[in-house]
Amino acid sequence: MLLGKFISTKSLMIKRSQPNKNYKGDIIKCGRYNEDICKSYIYFDLSSLPENIDIISAKLYLNLINRLNPSSLYTINIYPLLDDFGDFTTYNFQPNILEIPLSYNLIYKRKGRIEINITDIVLRWRNGLLINKGLLIKGEESRLDMLVFGSAYNNDYNNIPSLEIAYSIQSPTPPGQKFVRYFDYEETINYINGTVKSQPIDFSHLIQATVFVNNIGSYDVVVTSQYSPNNVIWIQDFSKKIVAGTTSYIIPKIYSKYYRLLIQSTGNGILKVYISYMVYL
């Protein structure tokens, strides 16, 4: 497995209170303070990624510098852009987005690095389903909480948004032969009172997989395997209860191009998901 590391080369913030302006300072914000709402945009140049690769995972890292209301559970939504953003972007003139966000549940955190799995978005970029125009970072605009992150222009390198992409190089296979490769995948999932989903991973040419789920929260969860041929239509397999404070495993029984987990709970907590799988190259 290879790892590509990228830092944001462009960022921008807009505010509802000043609808015809934008901001390119050393911070970006999302959320709500009184009646003001902020949103932010970031961009990563991925042109240096090789063409003949299979994406394993893509993790977005944001450094939380400050937060207005750290005592509450808060959801950050990441949207892929359909249009470019730049000097012309304002609250009154926002680029179009794909209305299918990736959500991250922030639990009582005031400062520090946040890891958001955006594998689904990067897969869409690489598969030609979307063009990489950047990302929108949007908070819960109905709730009082404002999150402050480092921007692409921050003087501290550690505060700049970054993206880590794990991938493998596709190897040509001689006629009549198949090569086998093993992969490991890890994801941390903040579950909430309700339903959340893990990020889809590519199970093309899968031979065998085992999914380990460590419930380090205080509530029991029900985990369900889901499969999809196109990352749009999802087929549901069997469900398994993971008791709080325990680790269990799931063996996928249906093989399709994409795989993810559906998590249902009556409280808030954290799951550690580890997947070990083997594929034909």
Image (tube, helix red, strand yellow):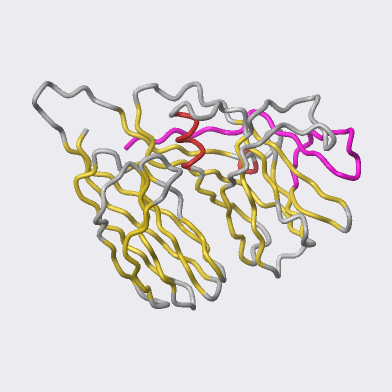
The quarter of the displayed image where residue 249 is located: bottom left
Decide whether the magenta segment is chiefly helix, strand or loop. Answer: strand
Q: Along the horizontal axis of the image, is 231 left or right of 71?
A: left
Quadrant in which the C terminus is drawn: top left
Left or right, 108 with respect to 223, comes to: right
Q: Is residue 57 left or right of residue 9?
A: left
The image shows a total of numbered marks equal to: 0
In magenta segment, residue 11: yes
Q: Quadrant of the N terminus?
A: top left
Q: Is residue 73 magenta?
A: no
Q: Would residue 246 be found to the left or right of residue 29 on screen? A: left
* Residue 17: x %, y % from top left: 91, 45
Q: Position of residue 197 (x, y in %)?
A: 48, 57
**Residue at image point 80% right, 62% down:** 144
- Where, by quadrant of the figure, is residue 263 drawn? bottom left
Q: Nearer the viewer, residue 74 or 141?
A: 141
**Which range of residues does the magenta coloring cover?**
1-29
Image x and y of residue 185, in percent = 35, 49
Q: Residue furthest left?
A: 176
Relative to 36, residue 176 above or below: above
